[in-house]
Amino acid sequence: MKKKISPVFLIAVCAVLVIVFTFLFLFVRKYTPSKEHEDLKTYYDLKDQDEVAIVLNNEINSAKAKVIDGYIYLDYSFVHDNLNPRFYWDHNENILLYATTQNLISAQADQDKYLITKSSVDYGRPVVKAASDSAYIDLEFVKEYSDFQYQYEKNPHRIIINNQWGEYQTASVKKNSAIRVRGGIKSPILKNAGSKEEVEVLEQGEKWTKVSTKDGIIGYLKNRMLSNLQKKERKSDAVPETFAHITKDFNICMAWHQVTAKGANSSISSVLSSTKGVNVISPTWFYLNDNEGNLANLASLDYVNYCHNQGVEVWALVSNLENSNVDTTEVLTHTSKRQNLVNQIVSMAIQYNLDGINLDFEALNGNKVGDAYIEFVRELSIKCKNNGVVLSVDNYVPMAYTSFYNRKEQANFADYVIMMGYDEHYAGTDAGSVASLSWVSQGVSDTLKEVPANQLILGMPFYTRVWESPAGTDNQDASDDTGSSKVSSKIYGMKAASDLLNTYGAAKEWKADCGQNYAEFKDDSNTYQVWLEDSSSMEARLKLMQENKLAGAAFWKLGFETSDIWDTIIKYM
């Protein structure tokens, strides 16, 4: 008689088998590589048929290119921010501009022809296509003026762009291997790399290495699947651009002459006779006078002829500050208005036989006009250079909020860049020096990071401020409860400031940290502070100019100086 198997035993065996098979299933599942493939359109975030993914320097960029009539077009913002910031798109007038050292290239949206200065070129297809929120530029046109290498791949559409040159590391794939989205065998497969396929090594981990392929796949391979690691160098095939400048074979000793009415031009003989060593004078003759880009004109040919007879060049100043009704942004961001302004400036230079132009555009809104301003400098420089006219551009001491003035690009196109080394403290700030030596020195150091020394002119003040505050006011608490300033100031020329100190019997004390004489005095209700501008402060800055081998100095403004200043100046000029 057979012995019966206990149901309890059967249940136990079944339970064990279930556990074993479950364990085996989980084990196999855990250690069996996934064969799932990532959808590449999803990987590149492509939503439309005409979209083209961009892989820039081994990273997938959020911007997308487009296929238009069978050609690749790049988004303007991507081009400007990543490939070539010299491209300028005027969204007001739908025109693309690009400045070279000698020519201005301009292309109207949706037109097959474009201009190189005045010569028409038939491109055979639109150079640029306008979009509601941007513009798209033909890839080959961008490449013609830019330094990058690219490769185009289909299925899905993508372009692989490199513009970072130098050493990089490669490896060979040992045998057919899956490149995965992330490190780990369960991660979806992006591509099966073939045996001996070369990949670029981006980042090495303990078990997995991040790599990129020549066709724009960026993912992870097992370390043991890689061999033959080696260093290679990616070289640019572009010809370096050179910039020509009109420079002088002497140190620039420039002085600004403030002219507010044509009649003041007649005083030029007495103005010059009170100076020594000045070889460039900049009369404040022109300013932006309406929103169409037209100039107000205070110029005098007799003035120019007199200066030339004295061996002095005339670099007339062009400003945007005199007419408060003018919207500088409106003018600079419309190509037709901006170019009208450029043409008028150059026309005035020719008409009055000027040696140079001194551009002084201040108080700009960088968010609205930054790119348009530097495009203005480019366009003006081309026409000035073609007519033998020196272009100098005035700049603030570098600060983060003035970076949009783009001094580096100015130096490419303009002949001289002038750092206005004054207004460290001004009306509305706490009391302090107009131009302490440490502040000016830092400004020069920062500017030299962007501008070659032989193009940099150091602007220096002939004026000072006399600061007035209620007796007992702490300069660190210069505002009242309403936020209004307790401290006020007035501009004084050198002699006027010295006379004021004599009137109050105030003693001067040399402050080495600011490179100036300082004085303080009181009356019945107020305290006065003066950081003096004199021959001592001037000499400290002239030494700074000399030590840094700068192109020269400029002085604001004639009439504020004392006669002894010129004896100090000529020692360094």
Image: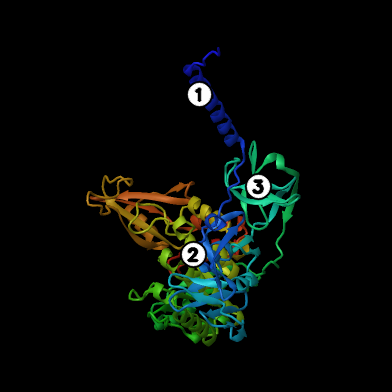
How far apart marks 3 and 2 lie (CA) works out to 49 Å
First in sequence: mark 3 or mark 1? 1
The mark closer to the camera, 3 or 1, is 1
Marker disc for residue 178: 3
The mark closer to the camera, 1 or 2, is 1
Q: Is residue 519 left or right of residue 13?
A: left
Q: Give the structural element (helix, strand or loop) at label 3.
A: strand
On-image quarter of the N terminus:
top right
Q: Estimate the x, y position of residue 366 in percent, counting from the top left.
A: 43, 64
Provide the residue designation for mark 2: 405
Can you say whether 148 is above or below 219 in the image? below
* Count of numbered marks: 3
* Label 2: few (<14), some (14–19) or many (≥20) C-alpha neighbours in 10 Å: many
Q: Residue at x 28, y 54 (%)?
A: 485
* Label 3: few (<14), some (14–19) or many (≥20) C-alpha neighbours in 10 Å: many
Provide the residue designation for mark 1: 15
First in sequence: mark 3 or mark 2? 3
On-image quarter of the C terminus:
bottom right
How far apart marks 3 and 1 lie (CA) works out to 38 Å
Foreground residue among 242 and 247: 242
State the residue lying farthest toward the front.
Answer: 1
Amino acid type at circle 3 is Ala
Can you say whether 129 is above or below 52 in the image? below
* Label 1: few (<14), some (14–19) or many (≥20) C-alpha neighbours in 10 Å: few
Amino acid type at circle 2 is Tyr
Q: Give the structural element (helix, strand or loop) at label 2.
A: helix
Residue 145 visible (yes or no): yes
Q: Estimate the x, y position of residue 504 in percent, counting from the top left.
A: 32, 53
Foreground residue among 183 and 449: 183
Q: Residue at x 57, y 83 (%)?
A: 112
